Amino acid sequence: VTGTEWPAYQVFKQDRADAPHENVGTVHAPDAEMALMNARDVFVRRPECISLWVAPESDITSRTAEELNAGLLQPPAPAGVGESYQVFKKVHQRGSHVHAGTMQAVSAVEALRRAREAFADPPGLVWWVVPERSLARTERGDTPELFEGARDKLYRDQAFYFPDMLLRQLRKEQSATRGMPRGRKGGV
Amino acid sequence: MKAGTDWALSDAVLGLADDEMILAQRISEWTGHAPILEEDIAFANLALDELGHAQLWYGLVADLRQEHREEYPDRLVFQRPPADYRNVQLVELPCGDWAFTMLRQYLFDALERVRLKALVKGGEARLRPVAAKIEREEAYHLRHTSAWVLRLGLGTEESRRRMQSALVAIWPYTGQLFGALPGEEPEKALPAAIPLREEWEDLVLPHLAAAGLEIRLESAPVSAGRDLHTSHLEPLLNEMQQVARLAPEAKW
């Protein structure tokens, strides 16, 4: 970070009401509201989406299972009610972080430790916790503006278009109107 | 003229279509050049949305003139000279800097908000469903550009200065936005054309003020009809029509 770059936000997208939020990537933005809009523009143009969360990358505490096993999380248990954390875990090496649940804890590290016990199955390879207060979410009222536009849009893969074929056709027509190329004159 | 052809109404719709088309072509110049990758994607999408809206309106023009729904819009877009375009001058102005682009887009999106709302409510029956379809996407555009205007206006000294000079340069062109649509019976297309300016000002003036920007009219407002264009439209069309002119009868 050079100091002029905007901070990175991790983006979590929910496709259906019965599916958890899942990490889809990052966006850069000057603030949470713009991060939500950038997330919408980058990740929700075509597919289904009913909700987005964004969290500044710097507010996410991340630990691998190895780090947790090595006992890197042995904090003195501080007193107090703490705050609410959202927990995400990655279960497969090539998967993404999926929302596992909410955990009340006095620190991020404590939330991680407790989350690992509470959401043990299936075992997580990499764990993320983020304080609830760092998370910005779209609201139900945002749905028409942010998500419904994409719904009836036809998604066209690039294979839908045939530029090569069209260009060849065009050249053929042009050479037909200008007379056949010299080499093929009279042939057939 | 074919029986049942509604020229008077189709001319008015052509104005709506040309606004969207020329703006789409103009702002697509940012593709690959926007300040950050995320905005590059967002803004290219926005240009594509405007192009889609143009397509909807041109389709209606074709219907009203009993022309082919696919081929006729292509002819309108790729074979008309500048003098036959019926867009407002605001949309043909060069992109300038990011502040100019964003402010122009915001003011146009706000125009779309009030114009489409009026069309959905009291527009000619055949215009209403098209307006309703476009309105939904435009709601997001306005949200996006409103947010940018606020942040650029309240951002750094440089962004504020650029926004303020963009506002001074753009404001006279807003005079043309609320003139009658082209054609003989624009009031049939959009009966409430005139009071729209007040509604638009109620929307944009508080927002511009909140962004720390000040309206200063330093040149005469543009009040020309939609048949008069700036010198910027011709080079835009030259580029847009370049390929079509090479092979006017090509089928795509």
Image: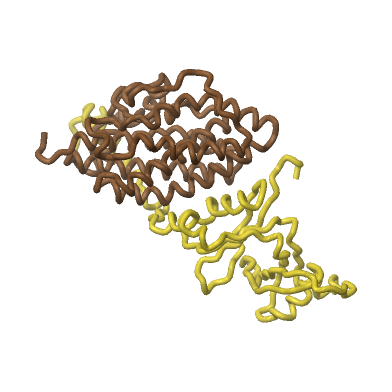
Chain colours: A yellow, B brown
Taking A155 as reference, is B86 above or below it?
Answer: above
Q: Is residue A107 at all visible to an observer of this figure?
A: yes
Taking B248 as reference, is B202 above or below it?
Answer: below
In this image, A71 relative to A99: left or right? right
In this image, B61 relative to B212: left or right? left
Give the quarter of the image for residue B124.
Answer: top left
- In this view, which residue lies farthest toward the left? B3
Q: For the point 75% across and 56% down, which residue is it?
A: A58
Q: Is residue A184 at all visible to an observer of this figure?
A: no
Q: Could you say where residue B150 lies in the image, as x and y percent from the top left?
A: 61, 40
Q: Could you say where residue B74 lies in the image, as x and y percent from the top left?
A: 28, 37
Q: For the point 34% across and 34% down, which residue is it?
A: B18
Q: Nearer the viewer, residue A178 or A160?
A: A160
Q: For the point 68% across and 73% down, which residue is it?
A: A102
User: Quadrant location of the C terminus of chain B?
Assistant: top left
Q: Nearer the viewer, residue A53 or B251?
A: A53
